[in-house]
Image: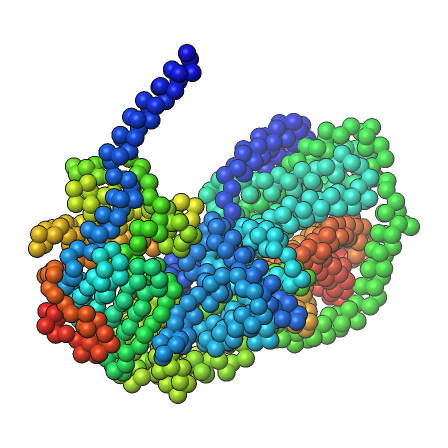
Amino acid sequence: MKLSKIVLLSLTLFALLSINVFAQETAEEIMKKSHMAYYYAGNDGVANVSMRIIDKKGKERIREFVMLRLDVEDGGDQKYYTYFKKPSDVSRLTFMVHKSAKGNDKRWIYVPAIDLVKQISADDKNSSFVGSDFSYEDVSGRHWSEDTHRLLYDSTWNDKAVWVIESTPKEKYKGFTRKVSYIDKETYLPYKELYFGKKDKLVKVMTSEEIKEVDGIITITHRTMKDVKKNRVTHVIFEDIDYNTGIKDEIFTERYLMNPPMEFIK
Amino acid sequence: MKKGLTEFAIKQPWIIIGIAVLITAFFAMQFPKIIIDTDPENMLPADEPARLFDHQVKEDFSLYDFIAVGVVDDKNAFTPDILNRVYNIVSEIEDIEGIIVEDILAPSTVDDIKQGAGGSIVIETLMGDEIETQEEADYIFDRIMMNPLLKGKLASEDRKVIAFFIPIESKDMSHRISGEITEITNKYKGNEKLHIAGLPIAEDSFGSEMFSQMALSAPAAMLIILLLLFMFFRQLKIIMAPMIVAIMSVIWAMGLLIATGHTVHIMSSMIPIFLIPISVLNSIHIISEFHDHYGKYKHKEASIRNSINTLFLPMLFTSMTTIAGFLSLTLTPIPPVQVFGIFIAFGVLVSWFLSITINPAIASLISDKTLRNFGKSSDEDEKGILAAIMNSFRNLSHKRNIAIIGVTAVIIIISSVGLSMIVVNDNPVKWFKKSHPIRIADTVMNQHLAGTYMNYLVFESEESDRMKDPEVLRYVERLQRELEKQEIVGATAGLPDIVKKVRFELFEADSAKAVLPDNQDEVAQLLFVFEMSGGDADDLFKMVTSDYDKLNLWVQLTRGDNRDVQSTVEFVSDYVAKNPTPKGVEIHWAGLPYINIVWQQKMVTGMRVSLSGAFVVVLLMMIFLFRSFKWGVISMLPLTITVMAIYAFIGYIGKPYDMPIAILSSLTLGLSVDFAIHFIQRLRAIHKETGDFNKSFHEIFEGAGRAISRNVMVIAIGFIPMMFSSLVPYITVGTFFLAIMVVSGLVTMLLLPAIVKTFSKKLLPDVKK
């Protein structure tokens, strides 16, 4: 008789647990949606970006550029085109990335002073983006499938309900050993990301400073990345954002690096 | 006062000892508060402009002191095995606390920019993973050799050395970190040899080894002194007094130093080793006199009173001159030297006070029964060795007085030549013996690589972006080429190298394109490409500020001798005088080797002032003590000749005049006048009694002569163990004690009597009683 009771109890427990699991999204599903909301808003996007890199002594470096993005495949490959306006001695310099969700990105740069386009291959997506505290990967996103995700707990962030999710790289990765994200339960956008390095030391913190609705799409318009060790912070502010502008694929070629599509350069 | 104190000590020995013990306990209780500071940079005041500038430069360019590790194989260090071991070692080193991980310079951490397929450029880590084949190893070597920023740093041209550089948060961690590095490297043992070098490690290791040497040599010296005293006096209880006086003086001086919040620096750690002989000297005079007197009269208290009475004035004056010698160090504008001088002076004062109280107190506690055989040791009867030596000194200076004066004159002439040959030089690495691992590492690595001594030449302008100006860059580039022609300069690296490297790679590795552009925008864009391409932006900002208003040229030297650093600095000054820098651009030096020459200059000029100041003060004191100008001048002879002879010897053998040798001049000054004071003071006292020159002349070689000889032997032999230290300054100090004792002892016992004999009619005329 005892045995049957145990079996019954176990079954009931299992059933209860299952309901709980199926009722909620898995951490992986949350991160996938977050990734889409964060990096793949609309089919394409154009924005004026200003970047302020502030070092520990408060010294500022400014970069202003126009950024064009085209999604080749939702959640997959993307193309980025960047036209620099400031600093003035590098104005007209252009930069293009063909982001590959699985393999290595391809990058091209056009140097106006010597009128030369050069392809650059780098195996390191974690290197700094134009000398800022954001890495290439922070700008274009790290594919969710590269990490194992785990829901740590539910919480609130500025009175908004959030999931706190921990992501651990499946393969050894230079960028971080563990990342903790605060994901808004409504918009799936991250409010905060904490990056941990060796010995589980906090190395970088991303914060969404301002979130606005643009063309009906909830967008992070101002974010910061703080390098904890260097005590340096980079602000990135997106202005004049346009989604679904219908940018043509041909713009993302070497030819347009030399001859920028001025209709998008505001 | 003297009578009162001594009487009190004789009557109430326990009270005197009790008070001394209490005060000693108080000072000993300060010891746990000790703060150790081994940073030679603190030789300069905290607000010294050169030091402030150096800190500013480190801050502006995020520079750190670094430890250099060299992996040496006699055939070829670039094999898969060795490279893989280096790969694993570096990856483990990254976990050490206090390391600037992102700035580690090693094959596995540096980016390599190279030509890729279809005219692209590829950026990848030079050694991204462990390798398998010799081809891969050769490739890594070739890539290093092709990169002007890495060549001579990561690899030697003869392939025998792989090096990597570990930046550290602060210098005082380098000894610990080098220990942890050794632990890691021991796990990956092959046939190759591993060397750890760099100035910070030499400086920090010296600091920690110094303390263990101190813990070893101070007690060793005490023990030998104790043995020698026993040989002379054969009475264990009475010879405890000098030991107690010495230990107490050291504890009081060090205790006060710690209690007043001073750090124990490389200099002040030497206080005990300086204080011990100085405090022992007084006690030996007292015991020696007591011994001789007691031997004759067998009256303890009378003997004690007699020795203090006889010795009070000479001891007061020898102590005063020693204090003057050390206080003169405060005229040197180097804080640790000043602290050293003040607290030794305090210790000397304490030891004088304790000598005239503790010695009588202890002597009075010893029963007459115990002292039964005291004063009868064999060394002073007519057949004893000491007596024999005294006799020969007496006869020599009496019969050959003119010859002695002649020889002295010759010695003075020879010495003045030697003095002019003194070379001022220092290098903290050379504070270690040649056989020391740090010294070996330094030799090996600087022989094969571009150098472990890093200096920074900083170009400054008020204007942002000035350093992108091709005119400025070309000036820097030309100066680099000229610097590299200097034998001591192993390599230079600066912003022009980065600009040229980027241009070279953009133009498909065309060497003709590896030149500086004429257009400032092009410079800006090439540097932007460097930042864009993931080429580590941090590397860029170690050579230029992000505002581009300051540029840092790395100048790597293969030797860290101040003399060599000085010559490089002078070379640049000359160059700039002939080729003025672009308008609005100024240049200044920074870096550890440069800081070292700054404090050396202060030290050398400061010591000159100190020494001449002390000389004048001591001369005035002598004239006052003897109430006679003639005697004052004569008493300065042993000191003058000792200083001249010792420093001339240093000049002749080519030993560089460095920090320890500079400091020792004050000790030489303070100690070598002592014997003359005892000799003259007591000779005149004896003559007052006898009134007969020949009697006085004979008598001075008795008590005083024996005391001086005993002192010479005790101190000279007592510090011989220091000569076997692995630290060169300790060897120097030990040698100096011996030299000071022997030379000033000989001069006092030969030249002074010879002069007295020659001018006896004027100096000590016979008086009829």
Return the residue nearer the eye: B248 or B7: B248
Q: Quadrant of the C terminus of chain A?
A: bottom left
Q: Would residue B36 appear left or right of B674 to someone viewing this image?
A: left
Q: Residue at x 51, y 53 (%)?
A: B92
Quarter of the view holding residue B725? bottom right
Q: Would residue B636 appear left or right of B767 to someone viewing this image?
A: left
User: Is residue B493 positioned above or below B711 on the image?
Assistant: below
- Residue lying at the far right of the rendered structure: B383
Residue B616 visible in the picture: no
Q: Residue at x 66, y 35 (%)?
A: B358
- Residue lying at the far bottom of the rendered structure: B512
The x, y position of residue A147, in whole percent, is 35, 49
Q: Residue at x 86, y 47 (%)?
A: B379
Q: Would residue A264 appear left or right of B468 to someone viewing this image?
A: left
- Residue lying at the far left of the rendered structure: A215
Residue A73 visible in the picture: yes
Q: Quadrant of the N terminus of chain A?
A: top left
The x, y position of residue B241, in whole percent, is 70, 37
User: Is residue B365 positioned above or below A77 on the image?
Assistant: above
The structure's colour scheme is rainbow
Return the residue nearer the eye: B176 or A263: A263
Q: Residue at x 26, y 34 (%)?
A: A22
The x, y position of residue B104, in whole percent, is 46, 60
Q: How many marks?
A: 0
The x, y position of residue B21, in whole percent, is 61, 31
Return the residue nearer the eye: B571 or B398: B571
